[in-house]
Image: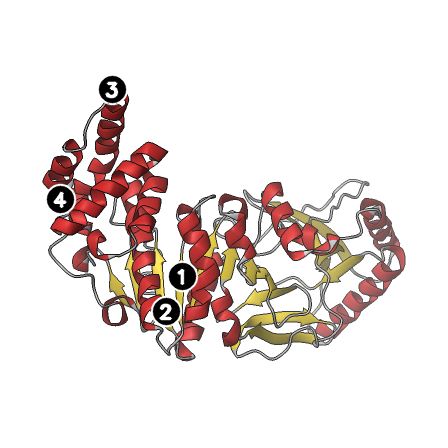
Amino acid sequence: MSGKVEVDKTGINIQRELESLMETLARRDVGFTYFVITGLTKNRTVSTLIILRDCINCENELLEEIENIRNIASAVAPHIHLDIASISNRSIPIPSSWGNMSYAKIYQKLIDTPKNSLLVEGFDIDLGTMKTDTGDIRTGIRTADITRHIGIFGSTGSGKSTTADILAKRLIRNGFNVTLLDWHGEHIGKIDGLKIVGSDNVIRINPLKLGNTDEIVEILGDVLKLTDPQRFLLYSVLLKMKRSNKFDMKTFITTLTRVEETNNWMREVKYGLLRKVYLLFTKEGKQLFTDKIENPNVDDVIFNAVIDLSFIKNLRLRRIYGLLMIKLISDFYMKNKPIKPSLLVLEEAHNYFVKDSEFLEKLISEIRKFGLGLCVVSQSPSSISPEVLKNTNIKIIHTIKSDLDKRILAESLSLTPSLYDSLDKLDVGEALISAPNMKIPIIIRVKE
């Protein structure tokens, strides 16, 4: 049996209750022997109470003793909950003598469960189960809320990428277009119905055909860390390149050198800009950007695809390409207003949604009107723009370790102390979820 303590009972002396329970069991003389085994691993510590008796066909007696111990615990240790642990396939030698002092400690905390199942209104996207006082029940979110944007957060290995995959599968079944920008190539082959776009079939982008030069300058300026004078100069150069319909290094240099150098400061601005923008015209950049084509048809090429970005080795180039892909998709929706709703999933979203990005902050506030929802997946809420976090109306939060991230989420969701304390104690696959169809945030286990 394993013990759990309620997370909001920090004022209670749990260790004293546990010692009282151990002393009470030590005084029992009913033919059972009790052992407390504590396992220490790299990422987890757990104590288990083992009930031992030499007997044959005595399952009923063991179950009766378990119930007796639970009753004893409710009397002498009312804030500790004992659950039957899953069976391990490991063999552990038990010494014949342990001395005359007991030692045990509770390592796992119990998260409050809702008292009834009326906390969640109707849903048509099943995400998993939540515990209630009447048992586990299925729960989920509504397709109508998808375009109000989704945030999935959690530490490495917490299950956030699996949740993104499950969500994508559910939406495809519900008639959505789904596109996933895969920063590390972790989703390849994991979502049936989505084609793979990567190094073997690169979608090349013509930046000169993307429209709205202001937004292109905003994207390049953020990633390349351009100064305000460099941004202004880049804007002028791009306008002239659009008129000539040429996007190559030679044209860029020719256009840039024609800008009059009235002083040394202007010379520094010009060559500083050239040094930073050169990245776009390297061998790797030429694989991604070209002036030789029209931009691809989003409906045919980009929808229902996992776009693998991991083959782009230069991280600044990868980020620029990803941001221009986001612009390509959002421009298509704003221009064509398709009837079929879509979700754009952005893995490692902190690589796109940096603070003070006017392009993305404007995008996330406006794109919902055109039937396109964004799903931002990130390890750390503090690493993305507060405006983006505010505009995600569905939040799925796996275990979070950072105190700063916990505070940000607690303020965003008005979490109770119990739920706040649970954020760094969720098991893999467990998540706290907040959505418009839920009266309060709840803990669920995400399941296929």
Q: Do the residues labelled 4 and 2 touch (CB within 8 Å)?
A: no
Q: Residue 248 carries which label?
A: 4
* Mark found first going from the N terminus, 1 or 2: 2
Residue type at mark 4 is Asp
Residue 282 image point, x, y percent:
16, 40
Residue 323 image point, x, y percent:
33, 52
Nearest-to-viewer mark from 1 and 3: 3
Q: Between marks 2 and 3, how big is the CA–CA gap?
A: 50 Å
Compared with residue 234, is residue 86 higher up or lower down, i.e. above or below?
Answer: below
Q: Which mark is residue 2?
A: none
Compared with residue 170, is residue 236 higher up or lower down, i.e. above or below?
Answer: above
Q: Mark 3 points at which residue?
A: 264
Nearest-to-viewer mark from 3 and 4: 3
Q: Which residue is drawn at 37% across and 41% down?
A: 222
**From where the camera sits, is residue 338 visible?**
yes
Q: Mark 2 points at which residue?
A: 178
Q: Mark 1 points at which residue?
A: 345
Of residues 120 and 317, the one nearer the viewer is 317
Compared with residue 382, is residue 228 higher up or lower down, i.e. above or below?
Answer: above
Q: How crowded is mark 3: few (under 14 residues within 10 Å), some or many (20 or more)?
A: few
* Element carrying mark 3: helix
* Element carrying mark 2: strand
Q: Between marks 1 and 3, how big is the CA–CA gap?
A: 46 Å
Q: Between marks 4 and 2, how big is the CA–CA gap?
A: 33 Å
Of residues 248 and 98, the one nearer the viewer is 248
Residue type at mark 3 is Asn
Residue 313 image point, x, y percent:
26, 43
Q: Which residue is drawn at 63% across and 54% down?
A: 412
Q: Do the residues labelled 3 and 4 touch (CB within 8 Å)?
A: no
